[in-house]
Image (cartoon, rainbow, N blue to C red):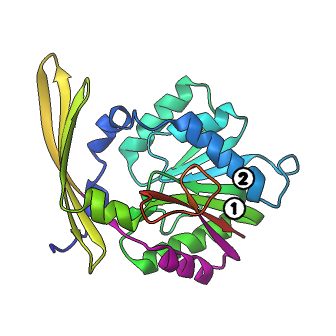
Amino acid sequence: MQSVDKDHFKLAYRDFALVYDEMMTGIDYPSWTNYILKLFRKYSTLGYDKVPLSVLDLACGTGSFLACMREKGWQATGIDQSLSMLAIANEKLNEAGADVRLFEQDITMFSVGGKFPLVTCLCDSLNYILSPSHLQATLERVYEHLMPGGIFIADLNSAYKFNEILGDNTYSAVFENSAYIWSNSFDSQSKLCRMEVDFFHRQKGELFRHFKEVHWQRLYEPDEFSYLAKKAGFSEVKALKAFTLTSPTVKDERIFYLLSR
């Protein structure tokens, strides 16, 4: 398998930010928000009415989840390493009248000061961390930013997703103002998936601009993720079938993890 470009983090999402929201129209952010809050109420030991309702969202992208949390009355802080994503998030949140703090930082070494009852990292963003040591470093930073009794909620792509859905398959989709051709190559030994994406973004009328990006993700099995989380200091790690309170199955594409401090 081709080696990972050392600058892939800097290059990925630069232009993707322009088409990200349209391509994520299938994500029901209000439903995701309700699920996250349901998990927080059930598993946090802090007491919903006894702590400041503040959330830190890692890899916050264009801020759609943060906007939903603000609508629920939560103070919101977001981190992303893509300045173009954050620029769109800032515009979106300002239009909604939301007072949100946004930071351009690498989530493997972030620091925003203060502690939060809830930290999140959604839409398989942790899969973009390509080494266990860097993932552990991220989890250690999360642990330091959590209040005792707080929880970290993240979702990751499963082994089934990497092997059967992404695999060596190619996908395409067309939207009103954008389109993509998405070609995957998954190596089961390294657990790395290379995703080469041709994007097309409407400039004016029927004129589209083409640009190409290469993204990488790594598979983390539940046992490996739990091991790294506990090394980072977390007392409990729970894996859930997406949008349920039950254990995941071997054919689930997405697994939610709850880490308790």
Q: Residue furthest right?
A: 50
Is residue 206 visible to the viewer in this orientation of the structure?
yes
Is residue 216 visible to the viewer in this orientation of the structure?
no
**Residue of label 1:** 151
Residue nearest the observer in this picture, 74 or 48: 48
Q: In the image, what residue occupies the spot 77% across and 59% down?
A: 44
Which amino acid type is marked by label 2?
Phe
Q: Estimate how packed mark 2 is, as few (under 14), some (14 to 19) or many (20 or more) residues with alpha carbons within 10 Å.
A: many
Q: Kindly indicate whether the residue at mark 1 contacts the one at mark 2 (C-beta within 8 angstroms).
A: yes
- Element type at marker 2? helix
What is the quadrant of the C terminus in the image? Answer: bottom right
Mark 2 or 1, nearer chain start: 2
- Element type at marker 1? strand
Above or below, comparing residue 222 to residue 23 in the picture: below
What is the quadrant of the N terminus in the image? Answer: bottom left
Tell whether position 229 is magenta. yes
**Residue of label 2:** 40
The percent coordinates of residue 155 (x first, y second) are: 51, 58
Region of the chain picked out in magenta, as a range = 215-239
- Left or right of residue 62: residue 238: right
Q: In the image, what residue occupies the spot 15% across and 16% down?
A: 205
Q: Quadrant of residue 239?
A: bottom right
Residue nearest the observer in this picture, 5 or 183: 183
Residue nearest the observer in this picture, 10 or 120: 120
Q: In the image, what residue occupies the spot 41% across and 57% down?
A: 253
Above or below, comparing residue 20 to residue 163 in the picture: above
The percent coordinates of residue 72 (x first, y second) are: 70, 34
Q: Estimate how packed mark 1 is, as few (under 14), some (14 to 19) or many (20 or more) residues with alpha carbons within 10 Å.
A: many
The percent coordinates of residue 157 (x first, y second) are: 41, 60
The percent coordinates of residue 18 (x first, y second) are: 30, 36
- How far apart in space, not on screen, are marks 2 and 1 (Cα)? 7 Å
Which amino acid type is marked by label 1?
Ile
